[in-house]
Amino acid sequence: MNADPEVMRHFPSRLDREQSDAMIDRASARISSDGWGLWAIEHNGEFLGFAGLSEPRFTAAFTPCVEVGWRLARPAWGNGYATEAARAVVAYGFDTLELPEIVSFTTVDNRRSRAVMERLGMRTDPADDFEHPSIPEGSPVRSHVLYRLRPGDERRMS
Ligand SMILES: CC(C)(COP(=O)(O)OP(=O)(O)OC[C@H]1O[C@@H](n2cnc3c(N)ncnc32)[C@H](O)[C@@H]1OP(=O)(O)O)[C@@H](O)C(=O)NCCC(=O)NCCS
């Protein structure tokens, strides 16, 4: 999406155009088949990024689970779009899908993503910290924090 190093410092590698397009195709297919997934965030006709629900494919102490996640193009940061979109996603997860819990996780020092989780009312517990099994040992982005949210605990407005 963007060459700004700040955008990528919490990810193992950058998607090239082909991988990015393939990810959007997978997200669209999932929404077509299941009715939910990673939705596009659009503002004034411009594609800003995504927010949505997914099921992590790796195995960890907290899986199987449904995760809320987000990613915005760098110029769209700092406007509240991720939190606004994530609130709608969480409401859908609890009200329509009747999920018993939604989790989210990120690298320990991804301050902006953790701030979105906290604005949603999600809570973290050091006992849930984990090393991401899909990221190689020794990588600086392997250590993750887990946040959890149960129905009724979500903050719908700031
Ligand atoms: C994580 C990510 C989506 C967060 O983006 P963000 O812009 O910081 O988050 P929000 O959209 O919720 O915006 C919140 C900011 O907008 C500000 N803001 C401005 N106008 C606002 C408004 N009308 N309403 C709410 N917030 C507003 C808030 O004060 C806050 O600013 P601050 O961080 O300086 O305190 C973004 O950093 C990103 O895409 N990062 C790369 C991908 C990534 O790490 N994804 C997560 C992997 S787990």
Image: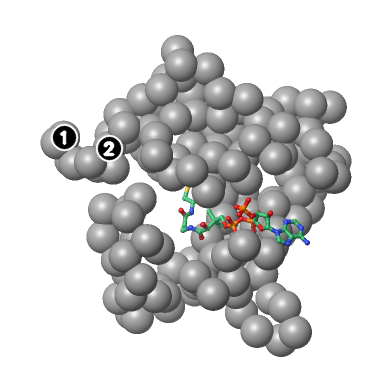
Looking at this view, name the residue that lies furthest to the bottom.
45
Compared to residue 17, the image places residue 39 above or below, namely above
Name which residue lies at 31% across and 65% down: 5
Which residue is the site of mark 1? 137
Colouring method of the image:
one colour
Which residue: 39% across, 75% down? 2
The one nearer the camera, 117 or 150, is 117
Ligand 1 rendered quadrant: bottom right
Task: Please state the horizontal and vertical placement of residue 76, each as a whole percent of the image.
Answer: 59, 71
Q: Is residue 91 above or below residue 47?
A: above
Q: Which mark is residue 51?
A: none
Residue 36, picture quadrant: bottom right
Q: Nearer the viewer, residue 51 or 37?
A: 51
Q: From the image, tell me which residue sits under label 2.
A: 142
Which residue is situated farthest in the top direction here?
Answer: 127
| Residue 86 position (above or below residue 48) | above
Q: Disc 2 residue type? A: Arg
For marks 2 and 1, the one nearer the N-term is: 1
Q: Answer yes or no: do the residues labelled 2 and 1 have beta carbons within 8 Å? A: yes
Q: Residues within 10 Å of mark 1 (few under 14, many from 20)?
A: few
Alpha carbon distance from label 2 to label 1: 7 Å
**Quadrant placement of the C terminus:** top right
Percent from the top left, x then y, of residue 142? Answer: 27, 37
Disc 1 secondary structure class: loop
Seen from the viewer's position, the closer of residues 98 and 2 is 2
Ligand 1 within 8 Å, label 2 CB:
no
Quadrant, the N terminus: bottom left
Q: Is residue 28 visible?
A: no
- Kindly identify the residue that appears in the image at 84 percent across and 27 percent down: 152
